[in-house]
Structure formats: structure tokens, C-alpha cells
Amino acid sequence: MQGTIDGFRYGAVTPVAAYLMACLGGALGLRCIVRSLLNEASWKPGWLALGAASIGCGIWTMHFIAMLGFQVEETGIHYDTGLTLLSLAVSIVVVGIGVFIVGYRGAGKVTLGVAGVVTGLGVAAMHYLGMAAVQVNGDFRYAPLTVALSVVIAIVAATAALWAAVTVRGFMTSLGASLVMGVAVSGMHYTAMAAVSVHVHGNGSGAWTGDSPTSLLLPMLLGPTVFLLLAGVVIMFDPLLVLGDGEWNKSAPARRTSVADQAAEPAPQHSIAPFGGRVATARPRQDQYGTATPSAPQWAPPPSREW
């Protein structure tokens, strides 16, 4: 018996919420990666790991928020806890592999291509591993061409995200890149879901029940969501992450130049004129070879007084 699938049980609520979480994870991840590239003195592995965890949590949270709106009318749905958590670990690890590759080796064509393929395949694996955690009284079947298209979208989205991570610097451009990432990741998810069909066992399976999706997924979504919020707090208190490359580089050289000029400027030499003359200031002068030599102080006679 063919099951009736509805991927939008709550209307536009779950797609919009899923998209926003994907954007949030992408934006936080991009800013953390930019932070590791702008300041070589910072702890680069830590910032790259935080960026990878942010992007990975954003993708995973997007997937399962979208799955809250998924139902099969002829059967109940519940989730395998172990596979659900494993999909989260896979998401973070594979994104981390790609982030560390481009973070240390740059965005060359070969490097970016390898990192994008690895990360894209990992994101697709996370999706289908998450789908394997979905248990119904029936069997899932997938359209091969649509599955292949979803994998291609995942690879393109991952490559674009990694390129943006090492290329985009300013805050507003990072924000725009994260919005595009959200569209790509959400598009991959719903393309993959379009490949799904369910063959339900028996004539009717309303009696077959398990844990409701909300009772399991909502507590599990709480942890990654709190993590993303804490990562956002870290970024808010780091001015280099907020300003980005453009604003930071505009202000930093000016500060360095000002300090250098003050240090290089010679201090004036004061001499006291005899017989009550005015104090004259002697400043060094340069000869034809550029060597600074002190000039003799110029003496000014005292003002005349009428008796």
C-alpha cells in the first residue's frame, strides 16, 4: 500500500524556521573562520573547530526542524535516538574536515574542489542517515535520479560555503553569503525529500505507534540550538569578528602609523639664553646625505627697557 506523504504538516512554519537555523549556523561559522584568518596570533584550530561546529549544527538543526513537518498519513512515525545523534556527529565532522582543509591550505581550485566534494558527500550522508533514523510501519523508497540531484546540490552548496569562508571578509558580505547558504542547504533537503516514497505494510497501520516526532526531536534540538546561541554571544563580544576585515584594516594601520610617527619625531632641544633672552628651540636638520645634525640654538636678545 502506497503511503500518503505530507512534508508541510505545519504549513510554512517548519520550512521558514529550518531556513533561519541554516542561515544562523552558516553566519556564525563564516565569522569564526574569518576570525582565524584575520588574526594569525589567535588560536586557529579553536576558531576553525567552532566554525565547523556552528555550520554542522546549523545544517543538522535545519534538517530535523524540517522533519517536524513530515508525516505519513497511514502510519505513525518515531525516530531512532542513536542514529539521530550519529547524524549530528557526522554533520560536524565532515564539515570540520572541509573547513580545516581550506583553513590551512587556502582556496585553490584543487583544494577547494576536494574539500567541497568531501563536505558535500558528508552533508548528504548526514541527511540520509537522519532519514534512516525515521521509523514507520513500512519501507522508504527513493528515486535514484532525484537522490543524485540532491547529492550534486549538496556538493555545490558545500563548495560555495567553503569558498565564502576563506574569501568573504566584511560583515554584510558574510551575512549575504549565509543567506545564500541557507537557500542551498534547504534546497538540498527538500530535493532529497522529493525522492522519498513510502510503502506501508498492511491495509491500515493507525495502531502502529511510537514516540511522536516532537517528543523526541524537540529535546534533541535544544542542545544544538543553545550551542548556536552561545557561539553568537562569543562573536558579539569579539570586535574583530563583528567588524570584519575591511573596518579592522582601516583602523589598525592608522593606529600603527600614528604611534610610529610619534616615536620617530625627534624631541625638541631647549637652551636657555643668557642675560634674560628668550628660550630658543633647536631642531635637528639633515645634510645632503640625509644625516640628522643638531643645529645651533638661535639666541634672541633681551627686550630693551626704557629707564
Image (cartoon, rainbow, N blue to C red):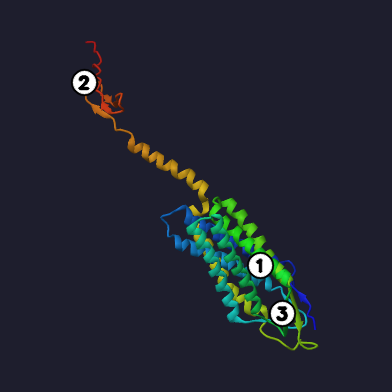
Front label number (1 vs 2):
1
Disc 3 marks which residue?
140
Residue at the far left in the pictured view = 275
Disc 1 marks which residue?
151
Disc 2 marks which residue?
276
**Residue 236 location (% of width, % of height):** 51, 57
Q: CA distance from mark 1 to mark 3?
A: 18 Å
Q: Say what amino acid the circle numbered 1 marks.
A: Val
- Local packing at callout 3 (Cα closer than 10 Å; few below 14, some 14-19, many 20+) is some
Q: Say what amino acid the circle numbered 2 marks.
A: Gly
Tag 1's secondary structure? helix
Tag 2's secondary structure? helix
**Residue 205 location (% of width, % of height):** 76, 87
Front label number (1 vs 3):
1
Q: Say what amino acid the circle numbered 3 marks.
A: Phe
**Residue 22 location (% of width, % of height):** 62, 64
Q: CA distance from mark 2 to mark 3?
A: 104 Å
Q: CA distance from mark 1 to mark 2?
A: 91 Å
- Residue under the point 62% across and 82% down: 80
- Residue under the point 65% across and 74% down: 128
Residue 57 lies in quadrant: bottom right
